[in-house]
Image: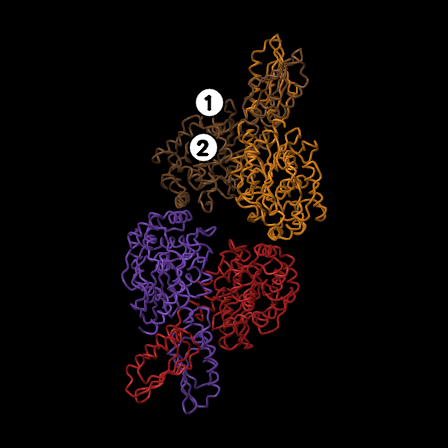
Chain colours: A purple, B red, C brown, D orange
Amino acid sequence: MDPITALLDDVLAEIAPQDAGAPADYIPELAAADPERLAFAVVGPHGRVRAVGDDAAEFTIQSISKPFVLALALQEQGRDRVLSRVGVEPSGEPFNAISLEAGTGRPANPMINAGAIAVSSLVPGDDVDERTARVVETLSAFAGRSLWVDEAVYASESATGDRNRALAHLLRSHDVLEGGVETAVETYFRQCAVIVTVRDLAVMAATLAFGGVNPVTRRRVIDGPVARDVLSIMGSCGMYDFSGEWMLRVGLPAKSGVSGGLLAVAPSQFGVAAFSPRLDEHGNTVRGGLVVETLSERFGMHLLEPHESVAVPAVAIERAPGGGGVIRLGGELGFAGTERIVAILRDFADGLPAGATLTVDATGLGASHPGAVVALRAEFETMPAGVVLVV
Amino acid sequence: MDPITALLDDVLAEIAPQDAGAPADYIPELAAADPERLAFAVVGPHGRVRAVGDDAAEFTIQSISKPFVLALALQEQGRDRVLSRVGVEPSGEPFNAISLEAGTGRPANPMINAGAIAVSSLVPGDDVDERTARVVETLSAFAGRSLWVDEAVYASESATGDRNRALAHLLRSHDVLEGGVETAVETYFRQCAVIVTVRDLAVMAATLAFGGVNPVTRRRVIDGPVARDVLSIMGSCGMYDFSGEWMLRVGLPAKSGVSGGLLAVAPSQFGVAAFSPRLDEHGNTVRGGLVVETLSERFGMHLLEPHESVAVPAVAIERAPGGGGVIRLGGELGFAGTERIVAILRDFADGLPAGATLTVDATGLGASHPGAVVALRAEFETMPAGVVLVV
Amino acid sequence: MDPITALLDDVLAEIAPQDAGAPADYIPELAAADPERLAFAVVGPHGRVRAVGDDAAEFTIQSISKPFVLALALQEQGRDRVLSRVGVEPSGEPFNAISLEAGTGRPANPMINAGAIAVSSLVPGDDVDERTARVVETLSAFAGRSLWVDEAVYASESATGDRNRALAHLLRSHDVLEGGVETAVETYFRQCAVIVTVRDLAVMAATLAFGGVNPVTRRRVIDGPVARDVLSIMGSCGMYDFSGEWMLRVGLPAKSGVSGGLLAVAPSQFGVAAFSPRLDEHGNTVRGGLVVETLSERFGMHLLEPHESVAVPAVAIERAPGGGGVIRLGGELGFAGTERIVAILRDFADGLPAGATLTVDATGLGASHPGAVVALRAEFETMPAGVVLVV
Amino acid sequence: MDPITALLDDVLAEIAPQDAGAPADYIPELAAADPERLAFAVVGPHGRVRAVGDDAAEFTIQSISKPFVLALALQEQGRDRVLSRVGVEPSGEPFNAISLEAGTGRPANPMINAGAIAVSSLVPGDDVDERTARVVETLSAFAGRSLWVDEAVYASESATGDRNRALAHLLRSHDVLEGGVETAVETYFRQCAVIVTVRDLAVMAATLAFGGVNPVTRRRVIDGPVARDVLSIMGSCGMYDFSGEWMLRVGLPAKSGVSGGLLAVAPSQFGVAAFSPRLDEHGNTVRGGLVVETLSERFGMHLLEPHESVAVPAVAIERAPGGGGVIRLGGELGFAGTERIVAILRDFADGLPAGATLTVDATGLGASHPGAVVALRAEFETMPAGVVLVV
């Protein structure tokens, strides 16, 4: 066992004894879940899946499908069109709240059922089958393998789905549902009944963590801005009326489902997923939440934790014997990095002997932020002769 | 003008013509504000304040005091005690909403007035004067200079403060207010009437950005975990019922006030503040919001933007002629960094000739995440002889 | 023209010039209504219909069907069963509010759409056709002639009925809907599309006024207690979120519909109905409301107006030459009447000469309230010899 | 024991064993109430008070003061001014709900605390003492004896009155409170602490039943229209979120208080009051409610019960030998009565021999409804010669 997997195994062992909560019971398929099941998995930038516990256990994705179908809708329809049908404000209310915006009738956000149904109505396709195919294909691309719908769970959800049908009719009465009620609702029921394992969810989360590129298959599934939008909305609204406390304690965008799944995203770092069927009063998996919270703490992944590496892009200085030299810039240039580099450059340039050359090699910079590059270029215009920028 | 200030100036010029919105008018002192005023300021890790526009204009801090008094309460009373009096969930409602949690009577969060008053009641001190002194002292430490209360604005706020008094009485009826109604409310009115400039607010924001250490005075104002908690809550709730959309579009924890101020925090990068009295329908400054949004875009500061530098801690490899060498680790070691370094080390160690030595110098690592260090140490136990870790 | 009709005509002339409000426009059939139409009709205990204005104009009954379908449900299912599906509390909210009781999911009352749909689901019948037939038969019995459904209006209502379908699905999700959603909703759409005139509505109102007996056909349509229950609920909830002010100003149970109809009931006195398509912001007909308010004032029909006749049942005293005589009781004996009669009897009996006889003839009493009769009988047991009660 | 008192005693004996509910406990004075206490009293038009059970037990009037202070405000300030500060719509919410109307800030109605405080702020007087004196004087006039404030209860209410102070500050922030918060709230706390017995409450109720004239003292306390307005509002809102069900089951305007008192009004018939400290979940006295419900049933007092006597004013016909005669009208002339009399007159006049005279003596009519009199006069204009109306 590699050291990272070993570390995950320790976390699993710590949390396994917790037995608070109970599985969802509104349909027989969920009520029959083995409450002892526990698994989690992490996927980093190189796409290696590390999993511990019951990582082969299959369960329905349920509400965790919501951010991925949202990603599909954003990719296909654009942000403006999606936002004309659904808001992005947390509602402070449970997952099945009605929460339609006064005036527009838009559901508060895409993570509550009403919003997710509005989003599902934006999936391209002429009928339920075409749309379901499109959804399954997208979820599969995120997971890096072919997923499928559990027809028994789907049938149960559809048979007891009066509240969701009510939400869809309300949306339609406000003209925020695209197409017919049944098309939207049946697509939604099917997307919730897709079967996954905790390994799948971790890969899906990692695809969001790395800007829309699946780190296992190396395929781009969605554009970078779409991934960022989805993570923003998960950050605000993903854990229902526990979203604020989750942000306080864990600090990672996350999404849970009633079957006991949970995924979270540390942008540029990893995707993580957990599975344990016992739920708390918000409908979130108890042990799954603890797993992610512990992992976030152990690796200091809270989004609002200050990180020294963010502030200090790699700078390597090779001084030449005659007083000049080469400054190689690496990493990524944000505001703090620009400020720091400008200070170093000024310092260096001020002491540059006549005739000496200072070459600034920016080819190793990982990303170009327009503002930072403008500042850097502007800085060079004021530099003494002999200072050369290579980009 | 240095290139960064020049860049800020460009942003100012772009946004200045916007004239939507209107100043707050519920007290004469706010209604009298010159609506044309516009300023903003940025403070990075080295504490240099760059400001453009009317950066000397003074205005009352209003609701922007809320996160800093929250910081004081968290520092003095601890997170658990504070959370027993106020929640951290966005309410989806305006700043003056009642939004008390059923059962407990806790206000939804510390950024709405009800929550801020509950927090103000936790400020240590025997009476309003002692508490006000403590609040002003804290705000001053965040700003790096001595601030004071505008007594005329305070008197107007107090004279028209029936809604806030109502909130305080409601809190007291639920036993979530510490001490008397007048003590809490008068402290709150005074904290809102502290005079600041946009430069002050930018320094205050930067103090949160750098883990509670004021980058200008180099003094620690609050502990790192308190700064993180405050930023988490600002991230979820700081922009009232626009918080979700702000997170989507801007991606930085922020707080606005009715006098037209706004500050935002890019953790480890900078604090930024803007001032422009015209407000939108959520009570947020129109041009101030655009300034911060533009800056976040230009520097790629959205929290949920993937950043390459986060994923790649600096690694410098010096190969020795005999096949060994030195690997110097720099930056910060998160999950992705650990994974990358372990891969490099394995690769290197596998090819290490008998007798050669590979020294891994981890002394340059900026922060120790327990999980990462455990993983790294564990990795070394399985390394062949000749691989040495220096921490 | 008889004097009462003349009086109605005066009221019509007074109110006709009012032109505030606008017809409903959510379906073409309602939007096309001639806004100038104005009619009203009154029906007293003898079943004579007095009508003025456009009394032959036909319109759809809409929400005015609700109290009559409620009457059918109460008659067939009993009060307890109906109340297990719907409450009787005013909600302070508009007609299409969701207003489901926490815990039970019961709609607030049968006059809002959600409650009316719950009630329609209790109409006996195996399918929509059977139930519609039953509803039309009941409405016809109330009106005293055969009514029918306007299929074009029904089709429009059904086509745009998403909000009502939403309500029905919500009810079903709470197990307060009997049978399927479509059966309930289609029955409801059809009951709303029954064609009536203002004369029909006045007869329907009068049937409720006279304890469930149609004063025109002399047929009992529903039992007396059912009529009382329906009037009680109309009194509390019939005018939506204007019910309290209506009770204050007019003081009669009433029900309005979006096509511009309105009926009101003065128990034991008359039924009244008005028709004028322009609606106010509560969805109540503007001129129809004024007609009923004026009529209530002119005839002193406010339920909470004290009435001398109520307090004084008819008493006729025939003194016999020898000192005795006959006391004939008429009218109805309530509390105040009992008290008065007992005082008269005592007075008379005290002065009764030996050997004289006082006969109390109670055969003319219109109704027997158990309490009053007990009190009267008890009184006789303490009377001197010579006092005889004939019942 | 007179037969009516005997009947009350029977009701008392039936209901006494009920032991559901519990006394209010938010202040020590209420928690200390003897839960076994039970009393009730009835007062009819002649002002005789019939009381059974613990009719000398004293308790604080609490919310039962609300309709009487409302009567004072209506009498002094007029209906329009009162309605500009408080609505008359039931809120479907508990007594201490906030329920302010969007836009205006008016409390929903004067029976919830917020509305009652708004009403108390309209009591004339320069300070709390003057206003309290005025309130006590009014309550005393309704009760027919001098009442006083229990200072211990008042002090407890004031000490724990944060929620009511919150409501008052909210009202003031919406400009619907007249004068200062403390003046309004302290007046309100004192009005609630007035000591009464069940006999007092029954006389107070009877004063409303008989149009504002106290039937014991024979003094007019308020004008008739004010009494009607108060009864209308009690009918809609008096029993909080049980008002609709109370109207269904009992059918009489009523008001309850947390000390266990309850009064109800049968217009023109009687006032009734009950006292029993155990309360149900709506805050209404359990046994008190049963007493009034039973009494309403026994005497058929439900407002929406059809009453024959209402429909039939007394008509006495004395036929003269020559074919004419005298028709004497008695009682009160409403719509149904007018219709009946017109029919009789027509019939008689049609058969009137030439030269004969029919005198219609309307001097015994108890009340003149403008509409009825107009109709009657109009009728006479079409009568043959020989028919004479005496009014």
With A97 as the anchor, is D223 left or right in this view?
Answer: right
Q: Is residue D350 above or below residue D49?
A: above
In the foreground, B81 or A181: B81
Q: Is residue A27 left or right of residue D300?
A: left
Number of the label disc, if any, that sits on residue C71: 2
Which marked residue is nearer to the observer: mark 1 or mark 2?
2
Res C150 seen here:
yes
Instruction: Using the image, determine if residue A274 lies above or below residue D53.
Output: below
Looking at the picture, does residue D57 appear above or below residue B374?
above
* Sequence-first disc among 1 and 2: 2
Q: Chain of mark 1?
A: C
Quadrant housing residue C27: top left
Task: Estimate the x, y position of residue A108 in percent, counting from the top left.
Answer: 44, 55
Quarter of the image where one finds residue A131: bottom left
**Quarter of the figure that contains the C terminus of chain D:** top right
Residue D136 image point, x, y percent: 69, 42
Q: Amino acid at mark 2?
A: Ala
